[in-house]
Image (cartoon, rainbow, N blue to C red):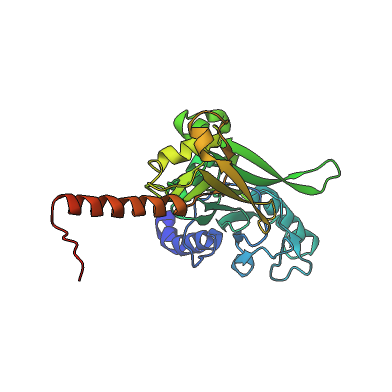
């Protein structure tokens, strides 16, 4: 009987204790992010059991520390797992004489220390945060996939500690065929944040002048591209083309350029070897103005003779 009367008075105090143990509300709502090492600019929620005045949501500073109410010194959070940071906060509260045997819970609300950027020949260049483990293929998918101008390789740049302990930027080259066509798991890299992914555009050569279809044409990195190959892509020469063409090529700096003469007639008659082309070359086929003028003169003479023979043109002295 006494217990029955006591329960209604005990329930409010129990609910109050439960509310004290709840983590603080955050503007971003509940999070279910995987546990990873904490980094600068990450947002974390700290809940201290029965101490709502110490339960806060804080963002890790750029130098990797956090500050808490009534704790005089900053607490290092960078490179710690949430469980390790819980122990550090509990120790700081105990050493500072604030609480005895505090129970601390740390939850990562938002990661901002693990950006992955995808740029270059993709449909939608993007930068996003790695929440948990992300694969290279997933990152490319986040960018909408490869565009039509994508080359044969994907460049993945990431920082790794060198022999002296200093971080160095290393670049890995991933063949597109192995990653996408062959679905080779060995090249589907695991990304944890901090990587930069760049998809270079395929190289191109430009064909201008007296060809049937001037334009730019892709350079296959795996096979040599030559004058005859791009002429075939340009659907061949137009009438009155010169027997000599020119390759305009820039140097490595992209400033100085040179002109390389190409004997088209000799190449097409197989009297001279084909000439290789590299990305950004311009193949110019000029007009044979002398030949055009001669043919035009012949056409006029032929037209004059035909008209005379048919009797249409009558010549007489005045």
* Nearest to the observer: residue 186 or residue 150: 150
Which residue occupies 45% across, 31% down?
Answer: 181
* Nearest to the observer: residue 191 or residue 51: 191
The image shows residue 70 at horizontal and vertical percentages of: 72, 71
The answer to whether 8 is drawn above or below residue 241 in the figure is below
Q: In this rendering, would 74 be left or right of 196?
A: right
How many marks can you see? 0
Q: In this rendering, would 161 be left or right of 282?
A: right
Q: In this rendering, would 80 be left or right of 128?
A: right
Residue 179 visible in image: no
The image shows residue 292 at horizontal and vertical percentages of: 40, 52
* Nearest to the observer: residue 312 or residue 98: 312
Residue 109 visible in image: yes
**Residue farthest to the right, as pictured:** 164
Q: In this rendering, would 313 be left or right of 216?
A: left
* Nearest to the observer: residue 242 or residue 228: 242
**Residue farthest to the left, as pictured:** 311
The answer to whether 96 is drawn above or below residue 123 in the figure is below
Which residue occupies 67% across, 46% down?
Answer: 158
The image shows residue 109 at horizontal and vertical percentages of: 55, 58
Q: Quadrant of residue 110?
A: bottom right
Which residue occupies 58% across, 37% down?
Answer: 276
Quadrant in which the C terminus appears: bottom left
Quadrant in which the N terminus appears: bottom left
């Amino acid at each position: 009987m006494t217990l029955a009367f006591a329960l209604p008075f005990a329930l409010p105090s129990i609910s109050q204790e439960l509310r004290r143990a709840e983590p603080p509300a955050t503007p971003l709502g509940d999070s279910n992010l995987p546990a990873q090492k904490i980094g600068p600019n990450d947002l974390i929620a700290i809940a201290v059991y029965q101490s709502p005045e110490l339960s806060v949501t804080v963002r890790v500073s750029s130098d990797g520390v956090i500050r808490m109410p009534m704790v005089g010194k900053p607490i290092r959070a960078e490179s710690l797992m949430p469980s390790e940071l819980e122990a550090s906060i509990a120790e700081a509260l105990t050493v500072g004489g604030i609480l005895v045997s505090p129970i601390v819970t740390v939850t990562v609300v938002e990661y901002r220390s693990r950006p992955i950027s995808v740029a270059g020949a993709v449909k939608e260049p993007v930068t996003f945060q790695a929440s948990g483990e992300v694969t290279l293929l997933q990152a490319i998918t986040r960018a909408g996939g490869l565009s039509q101008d994508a080359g044969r390789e994907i460049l993945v740049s990431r920082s790794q500690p060198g022999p002296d302990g200093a971080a160095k930027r290393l670049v890995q080259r991933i063949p597109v065929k192995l990653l996408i066509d062959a679905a080779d798991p060995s090249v589907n890299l695991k990304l944890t944040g901090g990587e930069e992914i760049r998809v270079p555009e395929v190289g191109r050569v430009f064909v201008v002048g007296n060809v049937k279809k001037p334009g730019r044409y892709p350079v296959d990195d795996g096979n040599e591209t030559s004058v005859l190959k791009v002429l075939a892509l340009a659907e061949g020469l137009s009438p009155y083309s010169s027997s000599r063409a020119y390759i305009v090529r820039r140097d490595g700096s992209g400033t100085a350029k040179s002109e390389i003469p190409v004997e088209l007639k000799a190449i097409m008659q197989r009297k001279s070897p084909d000439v290789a082309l590299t990305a950004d070359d311009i193949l110019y086929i000029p007009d044979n103005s002398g030949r055009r003028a001669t043919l035009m003169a012949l056409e006029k003479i032929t037209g004059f003779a035909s008209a005379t023979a048919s009797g249409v043109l009558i010549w007489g002295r005045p």
